[in-house]
């Protein structure tokens, strides 16, 4: 692909716009004041979905990544596709009680209450280079817990990657828990044509 002087790939701007357009914005879901970014409509658009995955694959394919860890539930969709694209294994990070084997767990705080992520012991070997993928980052609490889980297993977290970054003061400087954070798109703030 043709590469511009500033490093941006020709056509990437249009691809990003089409990906953004394919994400449905649902005001006040699941509660008043939230502009919900619904990625299920992106999945209905084969080209836009593939373009989104391909951008991550292009970014990570030559970075010696052997593990893609995806956060339940929507991180599974993008994470497993990216893992196939770069030839890495996929490791699911699950909500409590979903994994049958021995697990390690990390709790994290949500806006209201708390949650927990679990990972199978032995899924990742010490020193493996990992990227963590989710659909969206807001407070960064979920990705922080994911990072802690992988680091407890001795893995090297190279980067966290998300399709959408909802701005939150705690997710400053494109870092989460000290690790680089790559965000494909800003959220759409107005309803679109769905
Ligand atoms: O940056 P944070 O503030 O931690 O929020 C981001 C997380 O919130 C959403 O998942 P949710 O917890 O709603 O779970 P779900 O995917 O199972 O619906 C989203 O898919 C991220 O995983
Ligand atoms: N605005 C939002 N849209 C979709 N998922 C979310 N998780 C947290 N905030 C969200």
Image (cartoon, grey):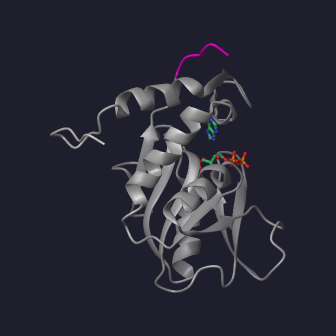
Say if residue 9 shows up in the picture: yes
Q: Is residue 110 magenta?
A: no
Residue 62 drawn at (x, y percent): 36, 65
Residue at left 74%, top 31%?
30
Task: Tell which residue pokes out farthest to the front in this image.
Answer: 1
> 183 and 179: which one is in front?
183
Task: Tell which residue pokes out farthest to the left in this image.
Answer: 5
Q: Is residue 192 magenta?
A: yes
Say if residue 165 shows up in the picture: no
Residue at left 39%, top 64%?
178
> 41 and 192: which one is in front?
41
Residue 191 drawn at (x, y percent): 60, 16
Task: Tell which residue pokes out farthest to the top in this image.
Answer: 193
Residue 100 versus residue 114 in the image, above or below: below
Residue at left 55%, top 41%?
50
Majority secondary structure of the magenta segment? loop
Q: Which residues are magenta?
A: 189-194
Residue 136 as seen in the image, left or right of residue 107: left
Residue 98 drawn at (x, y percent): 82, 66
Quarter of the view holding residue 123 = bottom right
User: Quadrant location of the N terminus?
Assistant: top left
> 75 and 47: which one is in front?
47
Residue 78 drawn at (x, y percent): 60, 50
User: Quadrant location of the C terminus?
Assistant: top right
Residue 189 as seen in the image, left or right of residue 114: left
Residue at left 59%, top 65%?
69
Residue 187 as seen in the image, left or right of residue 61: right
């Amino acid at each position: 692909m043709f590469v511009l002087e500033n490093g941006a790939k020709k056509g990437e701007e249009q691809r990003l716009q089409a990906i953004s357009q394919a994400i449905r914005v649902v005001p006040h879901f699941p509660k008043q004041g939230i502009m919900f970014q619904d990625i299920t409509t992106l999945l209905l658009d084969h080209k836009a979905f593939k373009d989104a995955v391909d951008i991550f694959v292009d970014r990570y394919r030559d970075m010696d990544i052997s593990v893609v860890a995806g956060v339940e539930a929507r991180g599974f969709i993008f994470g497993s596709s990216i893992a196939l694209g770069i030839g890495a294994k996929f490791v699911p990070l699950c909500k409590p009680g979903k994994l049958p084997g021995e697990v390690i767990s990390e709790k994290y705080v949500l806006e209201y209450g708390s949650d927990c992520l679990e990972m199978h012991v032995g899924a990742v070997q010490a020193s493996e280079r990992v990227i963590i993928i989710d659909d969206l980052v807001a407070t960064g609490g979920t990705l922080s817990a994911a990072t802690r889980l992988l680091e407890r297993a001795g893995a090297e977290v190279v980067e966290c990657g998300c399709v959408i970054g909802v701005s939150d003061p705690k997710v400053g400087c494109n870092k989460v828990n000290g690790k680089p954070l790559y965000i494909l798109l800003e959220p759409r703030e107005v309803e679109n044509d769905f």
